[in-house]
Amino acid sequence: MAIELNQIWEFPIKEFHPFPKAKLGVGAHDMLGVEAKELGMTRVLLMTTGLRGSGIIEELTGKIEYQGVDVVLFDEVQSNPKDFNAMDAAARYQSEKCDGIISVGGGSSHDAAKGARMVIAHDGRNINEFEGFSKATNKENPKHIAVSTTAGTGSETSWAYVITDTSDMDNPHKWVAFDDSCLVDLAMDDPLLYYSCPEHFTAFCGFDVLAHASEPFVSRLDFEPSLGNAKYSIELIRDNLRTAVYDPKNLAARSGMMHAQYIAAQAFNSGGLGMIHSMSHAFSAFYDSHHGLNNAIALPRVWEYNLPARYERYAEIAALLGVDTRNMTTVQAADAAVEEAIRLSKDLGIPENFGQLTTSTYEKNRMNTGKYEGRGDGVDTSDAQVRAIAEHMMGDWCTPANPRESTVESLIPMVRHAFTGSY
Ligand SMILES: [Fe+2]
C-alpha cells in the first residue's frame, strides 16, 4: 500500500513566497513622489482611512504632486476593511482613469488596496470570491506603493490581505487571502510616520507583531527560513515596544518596532499563522474591533492552548522575551512565556478579555458609516456567541498551520476564557 507523504507530515514540501522591494528608515517617505514616477504612475488613487489631524496625507500628497503625478484621494477605507471599501475603490480607480495605487496607513489601507487591485484585474468580480490561497487568475494588476504609518500589519511586505464580507450580517464573516500577485511594488516603512500613532494603537499593533513573530515560530509548517526572523522580531519587541508606547517620540524605539513589524511579516509570509489570527478575525467579524487589540487578548490564551504541542518552542520564546530560563525545565520556561505575555499585556493597558470591550474600544460606530448597522451595545458573552466564534475560527485559513489539531469543542473553553476570563 502506498503511503501518502501527507500522512507522515502535513507540509512535506515547503513553499517560499517572495517579498517586494522596500525603502526603510528615516526620511524614506521623502522619496514617495520620485518612486511613484519611477514606477510609471501618472495619476494615483491614494487610499487611506484619512489619518485626520496628522497632516500626513497632506504632506505625502504634496510630495507626489511635486513630481507631476496627479492624486485622487480615496479616504473612505474603514478599519477592518469591508468588501465594499475594495469595490468602491476599484470603481473610483476606473472612473478616475488612475494608473497606480498608493495606500497610506496600517493594514486596513494596504489590504483594501490589495483587494481593489484584485477587483480591477478581474473585471469587477466580487472581492469575496478571492478568499483563500492564490485565487487570482489574472496576475496583472495595478502597481501599488504601500506607505506604513503603524508598526503592526506587515501587509506592506506580505502576500496576505484580510477583508470583511458584509453580504450576510446575520452570519458575519471576515476572511484572509494569500496571493503572490497582490504583493506591492514598493513598501515604505519610515519611523517618522509612526510618531503620530497614538499610545493605544501602538500597543495594539505591537501585539499584532508579536503574533506575526510567534505564530510561524510554533507553526506546523515549521519553515526554517522563517525562524531567524521570528526570533529576532521577538527580541526587538522585547526591547522596544514598551518604550514606543510610553515615549512615542523615541526614534530608536519607533525604528526598532518598524523593523520588528517588517521582519515578523516576512516570517509568517511563508511560515504561516495560527489560532491567534483565527480568533482575532472571528471576533472582528462580529464586533469590528481593532485587529491588534483582538490579537492582544487572544495571544496569551492561544499560547497556553498550544503549549502541549510545542513546549520547546515556547520555552525559547520565554528566553527571547527576556526571562532567565537557565534553571527552569522546558515546561516551566514555556509557562513563563505565557506569564511574560500577560505581563506585557498589563504593562500596555490591554483589556483582560473581550467582554470588557465597549463601543469605544471596538469601534462600532465605524460600522455605522458603511452600509450596515452596528450590533448594539456591549459584547455578547453568551455560550451561543462563544460557539459562533469557535466555528468561525475553524473555517479560517490561518487555522491549518496552528500547531495543535483542533475542533470546535476543543476551542470553546479557550474562547470562553477570552470572552470572560481573567489572568
Ligand atoms: Fe495580523
Image (cartoon, helix red, strand yellow):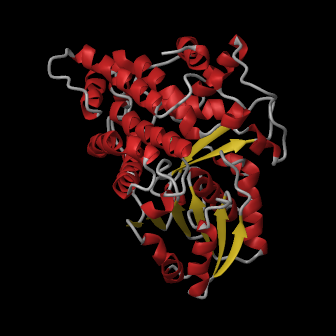
Quadrant position of residue 325: top left
- The image position of residue 113, as x and y in percent, is 63, 60
Task: Decide: is 149 above or below 93.
Answer: above
Q: Residue at x 40, y 41 (%)?
A: 242
- Residue 1: x and y in percent read 34, 20
Of the pair 4 and 180, the residue shown nearer to us: 180
Image point (51%, 53%), residue name: 150
Q: Residue 422 at what x, y percent from top left?
A: 53, 15
Q: Is residue 207 above or below residue 314?
A: below
| Number of callouts | 0
Percent x, y of residue 329? 20, 14
Q: Could you tell whether 193 is left or right of 216 in the image?
A: right
Comparing 125 with 242, the one in front is: 242
Quadrant of residue 220 in the image?
A: top left
Q: Looking at this rendering, what residue extends furthest in the bottom direction?
A: 68
Residue 241 visible, this orientation:
yes
* Residue at the far left in the pictured view: 327
- Say which of 24 and 157 sits in front: 24
* Residue at image coords 39%, 55%: 250
The answer, for residue 189, to whether it is visible in the render is: no
Left or right relative to 280: residue 77 = right
Q: Residue at x 79, y 27 (%)?
A: 377
Say if 52 sits above or below 27 in the image. above
